Image (cartoon, helix red, strand yellow):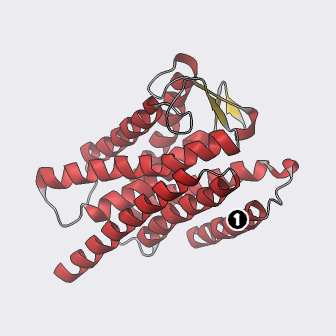
Amino acid sequence: MTTYIFRFFIFWYVCGLILISFDLLPPWLEWANSVFLITAGIIAGIYFSKMYGLWKGTSYSLFIIFFSIYVEHLGVKYNFLFGSYAYTENFGLKIGDTPFTIGFAWLLIIGCSHELARMISSGLHGINKAIVFLFTGALSAVTMDLILDPVSYKVKEYWIWLDPGVYYDIPFSNFFGWFTLAAFFHIIFLLWGPEKPAEAGQWPRRMSLVFGLIIGMFIIIAFTGQLYFAIILVSLLTAGWYVLYFWRKKHVSTSS
């Protein structure tokens, strides 16, 4: 069943990529964006469940969804953590002033960044492992936001920034907020201390693939908005993360 869900995600991704690349997405089909985000979040939830067991993986996933929605609500209402911003009606169904899908978006982000952090920190021990895991997880999440935020703000208008900023009019507080919240979720994981990952089959590889797929989709959309600096910056950073990921993967497999 979970493999079929992943295949559906890939199918939905390819369809969306074609529609976006050729500017064929009609306004009445904007709801498909919400379906895509929810499906992508579910993929991350399955990944956590496969890695750490159904109960633990599902509990962690639900915590990410609901806590991130609450933090985003505080951000919109009180300018907490990220800066001053507001969501438009383009981002789907809202709970009060915060889109419900934002929780699934955060689950997707944490799933991708967790897999990178898990592999890059593998083979290390003690405090070194924890530090590398924490900073890799937080920084790779910010890497995703460096393309997600400009596209969502400048091209898709999913939200509007009310504070000025140097990077595509996005305030630095946003990226600091992303780093902080992503680091928090990874700290929770470290404190939770689940048992060694179970035999998860293809799901680690799939999650590492999703990291690149999501960034790739937003890079294509960024071309339509002529966000060339973001494209170059995030492409280089993404390549760097993959080099580290596969280097550590090869090193760990050679050592074992």
Residue farthest to the top, as pictured: 78
Q: Secondary structure at mark 1?
A: helix
Instruction: Decide if residue 65 is in sight here.
Output: yes
Image quadrant in which you'd find residue 73: top right
Q: Is residue 24 above or below residue 142?
A: below
Residue farthest to the bottom, as pictured: 254
Instruction: Decide if residue 54 is in sight here.
Output: no
User: Which residue does the numbered mark 1 point to in the structure image?
Assistant: 17
Q: Tag count in the figure?
A: 1
Residue farthest to the left, as pictured: 126
Q: Position of residue 31 (x, y in %)?
A: 78, 48
Q: Front-most of 45 and 173?
A: 173
Look at label 1 and name its amino acid. Leu
Q: Residues within 10 Å of mark 1 (few under 14, many from 20)?
A: some
Q: Front-most of 246 and 146?
A: 146
Quarter of the image that includes the C terminus: bottom left
Q: Is residue 220 above or below residue 75?
A: below
Left or right: where does residue 193 sit relative to residue 166? Answer: left
Q: Is residue 188 above or below residue 81?
A: below
Residue sitting at x 25%, y 50%: 193
Q: Position of residue 23 (x, y in %)?
A: 80, 59
Left or right: where does residue 169 sit relative to residue 207? Answer: right
Q: Position of residue 62 (x, y in %)?
A: 49, 43
Quarter of the image that includes the N terminus: bottom right
Left or right: where does residue 150 sit relative to residue 173? Answer: right
